[in-house]
Image: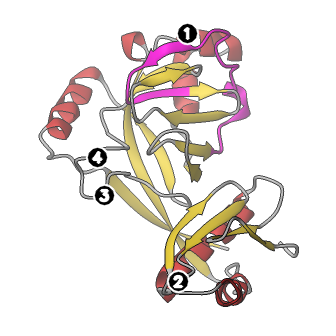
């Protein structure tokens, strides 16, 4: 974390590079910097876009000059966010595993040398850190998938994967927020919309937060799906203190 670099990215953006490796520590620093930028309410900042190891800051050069913006950011990244405790925000995402909702669960289990029930138990036993959003609106790049259920992507990607599908692609797991092509192994489906353009805040989660998958049966899936359809469902959220 000693070699943080601030680079120009065009005439109205700064790119802050926090390192070269994907790690919870770097992600924590990026998330803390995003919070500080929002808390400081820096005039001229248009958007902040976190990634695995970097943060892109878009600003209006008519309001704040490059030198001023760089100086403000240099001050923020010197803030030590490792001391004390922080609150972990965890979204509980209900998932119906297997069957027509997760057609690749048998293969995932076979590849891991486990039963389908063991795969589901492993998949639902971790809080997954959201490193970044990308690819599609609301698509989360999650960290923390247990190595026992790492599974290769499909040799031939599907032309259409339904929105809400939960899958594994190599060492990652995640949720497809929209109907789209994709090559991940599908293990289940959630009725929750991680992206809904009709919602006041379209994207449900943010980088730096966490997801915990909760197994449900089909009647519960159908019940929640109807609530979501009518705009009456709110995702359960847990808050936990963690020492840093």
Q: Earlier in the sequence, mark 1 or mark 4?
A: 1
Q: Distance of mark 1 from mark 4, alpha carbons?
A: 34 Å
Q: Earlier in the sequence, mark 3 or mark 1?
A: 1
Instruction: Please report contact status of discs 3 and 4: CB closer than 8 Å, yes or no.
Output: no
Residue 212 higher or lower than 81, as above or below: above
Quadrant where the C terminus sits is: bottom right
Q: Which residue is mark 2?
A: 62
Q: Which residue is mark 4?
A: 197
What mark, if any, has residue 106 been given in the picture?
1
Indicate yes or no whether the magenta region holds residue 144: yes
Instruction: Please report contact status of discs 3 and 1: CB closer than 8 Å, yes or no.
Output: no
Q: Earlier in the sequence, mark 3 or mark 2?
A: 2
Q: Which residue is mark 3?
A: 201
Residue 12 horizontal side relative to residue 203, left or right: right
Q: Distance of mark 1 from mark 2, alpha carbons?
A: 57 Å
Q: Residue at x 15, y 32 (%)?
A: 226
Q: Distance of mark 4 from mark 2, alpha carbons?
A: 31 Å
């Amino acid at each position: 974390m000693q070699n943080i670099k601030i680079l120009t990215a065009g005439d109205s953006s700064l790119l802050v590079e926090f390192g070269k490796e994907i790690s919870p520590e770097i992600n924590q620093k990026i998330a803390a910097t995003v919070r500080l930028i929002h808390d400081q309410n820096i005039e001229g900042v248009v958007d902040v876009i976190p990634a695995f190891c970097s943060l892109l800051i878009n600003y209006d050069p008519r309001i704040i000059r490059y030198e001023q913006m760089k100086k403000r950011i240099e001050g923020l990244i010197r803030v030590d966010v490792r001391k004390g405790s922080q609150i972990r925000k965890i979204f509980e995402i209900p998932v119906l595993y297997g069957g027509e909702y997760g057609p690749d669960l048998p293969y995932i289990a076979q590849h891991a040398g486990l039963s389908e029930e063991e795969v589901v138990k492993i998949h639902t036993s971790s809080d997954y850190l959201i490193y970044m959003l990308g690819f599609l609106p609301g698509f989360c790049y999650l960290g923390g998938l247990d190595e026992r259920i790492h599974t290769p992507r499909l040799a031939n990607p599907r032309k259409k994967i339904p929105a809400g599908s939960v899958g594994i692609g190599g060492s990652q797991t995640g949720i497809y927020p929209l109907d789209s092509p994709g090559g991940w192994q599908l293990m289940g489906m959630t009725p929750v919309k991680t992206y809904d353009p009709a919602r006041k805040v379209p994207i449900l989660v943010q980088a730096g937060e966490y997801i915990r998958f909760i197994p449900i049966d089909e009647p519960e899936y159908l019940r929640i799906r109807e609530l979501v359809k009518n705009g009456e469902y709110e995702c359960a959220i847990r808050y936990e203190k963690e020492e840093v």
